Every structure is written in structure tokens, then in C-alpha cells.
Image (spheres, helix red, strand yellow):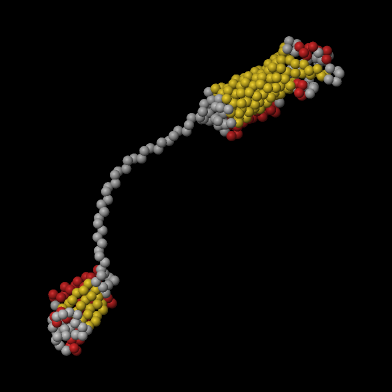
């Protein structure tokens, strides 16, 4: 019995430390109504010493783990004594027992507090007093009890004895405030309880079932709903003014006809403008080249002279383009004399045609 109470005391200490702080738990009162069977250990068959038992408890749950209760139980006890004929005389008596129990909720201890847990096992230990009475059946067979001094524990009227209790139970949740209760416990009572002297205290075990009613057991407050702050109003975006994209037309080609005086290859000032336009086109389009084609009119001069004139006209225009900063690799020169006249009049055929592409 001492070992049992040592274990209970250790669990209570651990439970007190483990459940010291729990914001979700609020203490509450409870009431237990129990009924079942008791067995007082004796000298005959187990079944012959089974008797009815009932209990009423009022308690308070201080923490998720630790609670206490005031317990009143009792009804009937049984004893047996050998009758000298190879059998035993069984006798009944009544008793009432009261005490204070300290309880430890094992589920909360090892798994933490949970308001709506279905199975809640517990252990307890307590101390109290037992008052036995109505021992008439034992006294009716008093001749069977030892009569030597110091051995006769038979009592009449009533007997008040000390008692120690320990046990284990289970509350099965039916609703927020009602649970089905199952409990097994044992009482160690003074040796006079069953009117017989033994080497140790009398021992009674009980198996009980009933209901546990909780009062003021509060549900944990719901977690606060965190509403994120409304986003700050954003300034209206400034309208985006899309500037029209001017798409320059792809460069295709440029043709300029540099005209010369009859029998000449000098570039006149009025024709220099055309060469400048050719140079500008070449600079603006680095991937292009210019073809300079020299001609002479067929209406005047000899074929030999005209071939010479067309060559000089082509070369002088090419030189002017190079002088304006264009690489020679981008210039192609050719001349045809009077063998080809691309235009209708003699004046138009005295020309160097510049084609940029």
C-alpha cells in the first residue's frame, strides 16, 4: 500500500509542475454517482463474499491533471468463518466509508489538456474512516469465533476504523458535461472490519460503474481571428502616354545622275549636290554600296574618245565620294563609252549614274 501511495504522490508532483500553466483550462466542480460490487477478502470462495456497493463523490478539478473529491461509499460487507464441519459460515454486515481522495488525470498528464477528449483515465489515493454496523449475523455464530483473550475481534453495535484507499478509473465522454464512469478501487481497513483477527489490515476491493457530471467546465476560448489590415489605398497610376513609334521605311535604293558638259569630266557645282546626297545615303546605311556607271553620248565623238570620257566621269565621281569619307571597298566603278545610252537625249547620256543599294 505504501508503494501505491508513493507512486501516486510522485505523479501528483509531476502533474502539478506539468499543468501549472494552461490558459485553456478553467477549474470546475464534478459529481459522481457509482454502483457495483465489493469483495472483502476472506476464508471462502471469492463469489460467496461478493456484496453490493454504492458511492457518491463531490470533487473539484484544480488543474488539467490534479483534482480532489470527497467520497462516501458503502452498503454491505461479508465475512466467513469455518464452522468445524468442513464448511464456512458466511455473514453479512453493513458499513459506510468516507474520505478525501487526490486524483491525477493520466491523459492530461502524458498527452496534454484537451477539452473534448473521449477517454480520460485517472488514478487516485485517499485517506478516510470506515464505520461498520449491523453485525448481527456474525454475533449469531459467535461461538465459532476464538474466545481467547486478545484474539476475539467480534464486535457488536458499531465499529469505527481508519481506512486508506487507492484505485484507477476511466471517464468516457458522452457530452461536454456528462461522462460514463468505470472505476476499480481497494480499501485497506482496520483489522476489526470483518470481525476476525488477521496478520494485516482487512482488504476490500470494489468494481463500480456510474456517471460523472461536470459543472462549469468551460470550453476553451476560440483562437482570435486576426483580420489583416486593409491595404492602404494606392495612388491612381498616371496615364501612360504612348508616343507614336515612327518606323522609318527600310532603305531600298537611291539613284542620282551626275551630268557633264560635252567632252568634259569636271564635276560642276550644281552636280556636287547629287554626290553629297549619295554620300549621306551611304553613311546612313552602312551595309550598302554604290555602283558608279560612266557613259558618253553616241551622237558626238569617236567610240575611243567616248570610252575614255565615260571612264574619267566614273572615276572622278568615285574619287569625290571617297573624299567625302566613304571607304573605297563600298564603291564599284564601271564605264561603257557610247555602247550603251540609257537615256533618250545626248545631254542625258553625258552622265555618271550613281546607284546606292
Residue 100 in the image, given as x and y percentages of width and height = 63, 20
The residue closer to the viewer here, 150 or 222, is 222
Disc count in the image?
A: 0
Image check: 23 left or right of 123? left
Based on the displayed image, in which of its 4 quarters is residue 78 positioned? Answer: top right
Residue placed furthest toward the front: 344
Residue 218 in the image, given as x and y percentages of width and height = 52, 26
Task: Please determine whether, in this image, residue 186 is positioned above or below residue 111.
Answer: above
Residue depicted at x 27% and y 70%: 286
Image check: 9 left or right of 353? right
Residue 23 in the image, given as x and y percentages of width and height = 51, 30
Residue depicted at x 82% and y 15%: 145
Residue 61 visible in the displayed image: no
Task: Please determine whether, in this image, residue 338 is positioned above or below residue 6.
Answer: below
The residue closer to the viewer here, 262 or 96, is 262
Residue placed furthest toward the right: 85
Task: Please determine whether, in this image, residue 244 is positioned above or below residue 221.
Answer: below
Residue depicted at x 27% and y 50%: 240
Residue placed furthest toward the top: 157
Based on the displayed image, in which of its 4 quarters is residue 282 positioned? Answer: bottom left
The residue closer to the viewer here, 39 or 154, is 39
Q: Looking at the figure, which quarter contains the N terminus?
A: top right
Residue depicted at x 55% and y 27%: 176
Based on the displayed image, in which of its 4 quarters is residue 207 positioned? Answer: top right
The residue closer to the viewer here, 70 or 173, is 173
Residue 140 in the image, given as x and y percentages of width and height = 79, 11
Residue 223 visible in the displayed image: yes
Q: Looking at the figure, which quarter contains the C terminus?
A: bottom left
Amino acid at each position: 500500500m505504501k508503494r501505491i501511495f508513493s507512486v501516486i504522490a510522485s505523479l501528483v508532483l509531476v502533474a502539478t509542475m506539468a499543468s501549472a500553466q494552461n490558459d485553456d483550462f478553467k477549474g470546475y466542480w464534478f459529481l459522481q454517482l457509482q454502483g457495483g460490487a465489493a469483495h472483502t477478502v476472506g476464508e471462502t470462495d471469492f463469489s460467496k463474499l461478493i456484496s453490493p456497493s454504492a458511492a457518491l463523490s463531490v470533487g473539484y478539478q484544480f488543474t488539467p491533471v490534479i483534482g480532489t473529491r470527497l467520497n462516501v461509499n458503502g452498503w454491505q460487507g461479508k465475512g466467513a468463518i469455518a464452522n468445524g464441519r468442513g464448511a464456512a459460515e458466511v455473514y453479512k454486515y453493513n458499513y459506510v466509508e468516507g474520505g478525501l481522495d487526490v486524483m491525477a488525470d493520466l491523459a492530461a498528464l502524458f498527452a496534454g489538456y484537451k477539452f473534448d477528449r473521449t477517454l480520460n483515465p485517472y488514478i487516485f489515493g485517499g485517506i478516510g474512516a470506515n464505520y461498520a454496523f449491523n453485525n448481527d449475523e456474525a454475533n449469531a455464530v459467535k461461538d465459532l469465533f476464538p474466545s481467547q483473550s486478545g484474539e476475539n475481534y467480534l464486535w457488536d453495535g458499531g465499529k469505527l476504523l481508519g481506512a486508506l484507499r487507492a484505485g484507477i478509473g476511466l471517464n468516457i465522454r458522452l457530452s461536454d458535461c456528462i461522462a460514463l464512469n468505470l472505476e476499480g478501487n481497494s480499501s485497506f481497513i482496520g483489522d476489526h472490519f470483518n470481525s476476525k483477527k488477521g496478520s494485516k489490515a482487512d482488504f476490500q476491493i470494489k468494481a463500480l460503474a456510474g456517471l460523472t457530471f461536470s459543472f462549469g467546465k468551460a470550453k476553451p476560448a476560440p483562437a482570435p481571428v486576426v483580420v489583416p489590415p486593409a491595404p492602404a489605398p494606392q495612388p491612381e497610376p498616371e496615364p501612360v502616354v504612348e508616343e507614336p513609334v515612327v518606323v522609318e521605311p527600310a532603305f531600298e535604293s537611291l539613284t542620282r545622275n551626275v551630268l557633264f558638259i560635252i567632252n568634259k569630266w569636271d564635276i560642276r557645282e550644281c552636280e556636287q549636290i547629287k554626290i553629297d546626297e549619295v554620300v549621306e545615303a551611304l553613311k546612313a546605311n552602312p551595309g550598302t554600296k554604290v555602283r558608279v556607271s560612266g557613259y558618253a553620248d553616241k551622237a558626238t565623238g569617236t567610240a575611243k574618245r567616248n570610252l575614255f570620257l565615260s571612264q574619267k566621269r566614273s572615276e572622278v565621281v568615285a574619287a569625290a565620294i571617297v573624299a567625302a569619307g566613304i571607304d573605297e571597298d563600298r564603291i564599284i566603278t564601271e564605264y561603257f563609252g557610247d555602247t550603251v545610252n540609257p537615256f533618250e537625249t545626248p545631254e542625258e547620256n553625258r552622265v555618271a549614274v550613281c546607284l546606292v543599294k
